[in-house]
Image: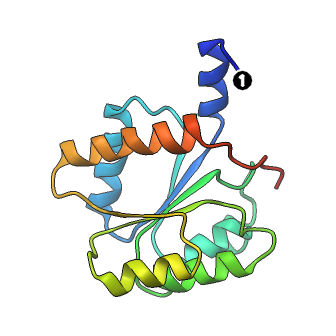
Amino acid sequence: MIKDPRIMQKLINEVSILMADDDADDRMMAREAFEEARLLNVLQFVEDGQELIDYLKKRGKHQSRKGNLPGLVLLDLNMPKKDGRQALEEIKADPDLRQIPVVILTTSKAEEDIVKSYKLGASGYITKPVSFEGLVEIIKALRLYWLEIVELPPNER
């Protein structure tokens, strides 16, 4: 176990996070919540499930993307083109992508969405809070769990 807090922080910051959300206001609020929570990880955004898959597979406008796959994906369910359920199913069916933790971050509280998300391989399911302060607390909890407690697989692609 790494004891030096500077080394630990460097390792935490190396994990990039990709958020798929079609709502520009939600993306802006998420970026501000990350800053407020002092989460310094690279945070990238895509606007729908199709763009998420293109980003992960380096297709379309993302074909010249540099760097490894994200260490964590935050995924909204209700998006145009390809919704979060379809994107999650495609990610978990792909041997090159299935190891990426995908946490659903959505407004839906529907039991059927929760059950289906886990059946498709979601690593977690979080209902978006209504307040900015609530989102900051969720981001802090995500940091603690996904970046400090959990051992993520090495990212080689």
Figure check: 95 above or below 80: above
State the image coordinates of residue 32 (x, y, percent, origin top left). 31, 41
Q: Looking at the image, can residue 42 be seen?
A: no
Q: Quadrant of residue 149?
A: top right
The residue to which callout 1 is attached is: 1
Residue found farthest to the left: 131
State the image coordinates of residue 20 (x, y, percent, origin top left). 47, 66
| Relative to 8, 77 lies left or right | left
Q: Which residue is drawn at 54% across and 86% down?
A: 86
Q: Residue at x 50, y 42 (%)?
A: 145
Identity of the amino acid at label 1? Met
Q: Residues within 10 Å of mark 1 (few under 14, many from 20)?
A: few
Q: Looking at the image, can residue 101 be seen?
A: yes
Q: In the rendered image, which quarter contains the C terminus?
A: bottom right
Figure check: 18 above or below 127: above
Figure check: 147 above or below 155: above
Q: Residue at x 36, y 87 (%)?
A: 112
Element under label 1?
Answer: loop
State the image coordinates of residue 65 (x, y, percent, origin top left). 71, 57
Q: In the rendered image, which quarter contains the N terminus?
A: top right
